[in-house]
Amino acid sequence: MPKIVDHELYRKELLNKSFELFAEKGYSSVTMREIALGIGVSTGTLYHYFSSKESLFEQLIEYLSYEDTKEEALAELGNPPTLGEKIETLMEYLYTKEDYMLKDMLITFDFCKHKTRKEIDNNQALQQAGKRYKEAVFCYLGISDPAVAVFIINYIDGLVARRFYQGESISFSEQSNLLKEMLLAYLEKKQPQI
């Protein structure tokens, strides 16, 4: 009797394994053959699911951004009653995901460094991932200004990047508190006066 394979589940498994390999070796320095060998499948199997390394990467970015921002993932954060508590909860959660976020960031930088600005701007996977993260922050915090969501993402990306090369001398907790205080003061100032 032939083996029944859930192709979508198997594709996701390949993407997860590829993420770790890309994180270890970098996007630009690994070939499809090395990816197949590294994740324990044949090159033919890898090409069956992904037409190229770029396609594999783009599907990986789409998959990760979807998994990170889907309703179940955001539900893990709960629903604290105040914006300040939501910011604290979000930052505590992100602190536990710092290594993962750094890997994702480094892989994406490695992919983008061989692209033109126009190619990056036109890359549907990258643009969709950015949109998903912005909407997730926007919705979870319940803020009405999309620019604030982009600011928060930029702040977090910068914090993770700085901690990568400066380590614990940059306190995640201290920076999280500062972000919370700045956002609350900014949003309070923007509230219409009655």
Image: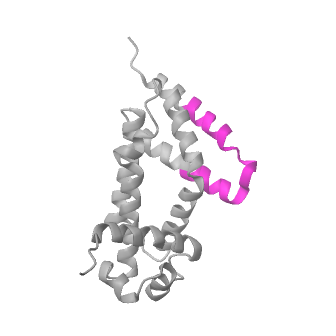
The front one of 151 and 30 is: 30
Quarter in which the C terminus is drawn = top left
In the image, what residue occupies the spot 48% across and 44% down?
Answer: 151
Q: Does 19 sit left or right of 126 as displayed?
A: right
Residue closest to the far top: 194
In the image, what residue occupies the spot 73% across and 50% down?
Answer: 168
In the image, what residue occupies the spot 61% across and 38% down?
Answer: 176
The type of colouring in the image is one colour
Position of 107 relative to 178 (above/below):
below
Quarter in which the N terminus is drawn = bottom left
Determine the main secondary structure of the stretch shown in magenta. helix
Position of 11 relative to 66 (above/below):
below
In the image, what residue occupies the spot 53% across and 35% down?
Answer: 89
Position of 41 relative to 12 (above/below):
below
Residue closest to the far front: 1
Residue 187 lies, in percent from the top left, at 47, 27
Q: Is residue 165 magenta?
A: yes
Which segment did they paint magenta?
Answer: 157-182
